Image (cartoon, rainbow, N blue to C red):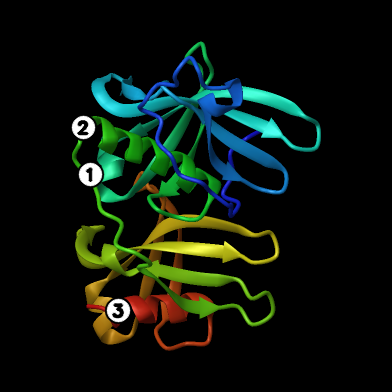
Amino acid sequence: MTPSHHLFAVSCLLLAQGASAAEAADERWVEIASTDKAQWLGKKGSGNVANLGKQKGNAYSYVYQVSNKKDKTFEYKQLFVELTSCKKGYGYVYYNSMEGEFLGKDAFVRFGATVADALGSMACTSWDQKTGKPSRADQGDTWEVVASAVETGNKYALKTDTVRTTVYNKKPSVAVLYSYEDVKNNTVSYGEYVFPLADCKRGFGVAYSLNFDGEQLYKTDLALDGDSVLSATISALCAKV
C-alpha cells in the first residue's frame, strides 16, 4: 500500500529508543498514522542517521509497517528524510525496499496533517531526540486559508511563515509554500507559488507553481483581485510583501 496525502489521526512517539525484551510484540511498533483503510507503524529502534544518494550522513531513516485494515495484509519498507528538510520544515519522504530499491517519494510538511507529513515528521522528531537538539520548533498553525472553490469547497492555503523574497527567471519575486485541499477526497497536496514582485505592483502577470525540487509544475496568466481561486491566492501572497 502506497503512503498517501490523506488526512489522518496520529499518535506521535519516538523511534530512536529500542524496545525492551519484556515488551509485547505489538509494543515494538509505534503508530504514526491511521486512516479508515490503513495503519502506518514505525519499528522502535530502527531509526538512525543514514546515507541518501551519494552523500553520507545526510538523512534519517527507519523501518515502517503498513497494515491494510480490510485485507488484513502487511507491507514493510524503509523510508528516508533529508536532514535539511527537517531544518527548513518541508521536503520529501523517500521510500525504499529492504534491498535498497527506490520505490517513490512524497512531499511532506513538518507538523502537518497528512500521512506523508506524519511519516516525515516522525523521522525529524526521532533525529532531534537522537541529537538532543531541536532542528525546528513547532510554530503552531501557520496555514492561512486564502481561497475556496464555491462548487467543490476545495481550499487553497498559504503557509505564512514561508513567505520570502527570491529570484526566479532572473526576476525578483515572492515565494510561499501552499497547500491544496480536495475536500471530497479528503486529501492535501503541496507546492510553492512564485510571483514576480514587479507584477504584484502592476496588478497582473504570470504565477508559477513549483514542486519541492524547484521544478515548474505549471504557469498561469492572471490579474490580481480577480474572481478565480488562483487570483485570490496570489493576491493574498502579494499583500504579504
In the image shown, does 171 or 116 lie closer to the viewer?
116
What's the residue at 68%, 40% (across, down)?
38
Disc 3 marks a residue whose amino acid type is Cys
Mark 3 or 1: the one toward you = 1
Instruction: Indicate left or right for 47 with 32 as reference.
Output: left
Q: Secondary structure at mark 1?
A: loop
* Residue neighbourhood size for the residue with mark 1, other residues' Cα within 10 Å, grouped as few (<14), some (14–19), many (≥20): some
Where does label 1 land, which residue?
135
Q: Quadrant of the N terminus?
A: top right
Give the image quarter of residue 152. bottom right
Q: Which residue appears farthest toward the top when viewing the image?
A: 99
Q: CA distance from mark 1 to mark 2?
A: 9 Å
Which of the marked residues, 2 or 3, is nearer the chain's N terminus? 2
Kindly tell me whether residue 151 is visible in this rendering.
Answer: yes
Establish if 192 lies above or below 134.
Answer: below
Q: CA distance from mark 3 to mark 1?
A: 30 Å
Instruction: Indicate left or right for 104 with 197 as reference.
Output: right
Establish if 13 lies above or below 195.
Answer: above
Mark 2 or 3: the one toward you = 2
Disc 1 marks a residue whose amino acid type is Ser
Kindly tell me whether residue 103 is visible in this rendering.
Answer: no
Which of the marked residues, 3 or 1, is nearer the chain's N terminus? 1
Where does label 3 land, which residue?
238
CB atoms of marks 1 and 2 within 8 Å = yes
What's the residue at 52%, 55% (across, down)?
189
Q: Position of residue 65 (x, y in %)?
A: 59, 27
Instruction: Indicate left or right for 45 with 98 as reference.
Output: left
Where does label 2 land, which residue?
131
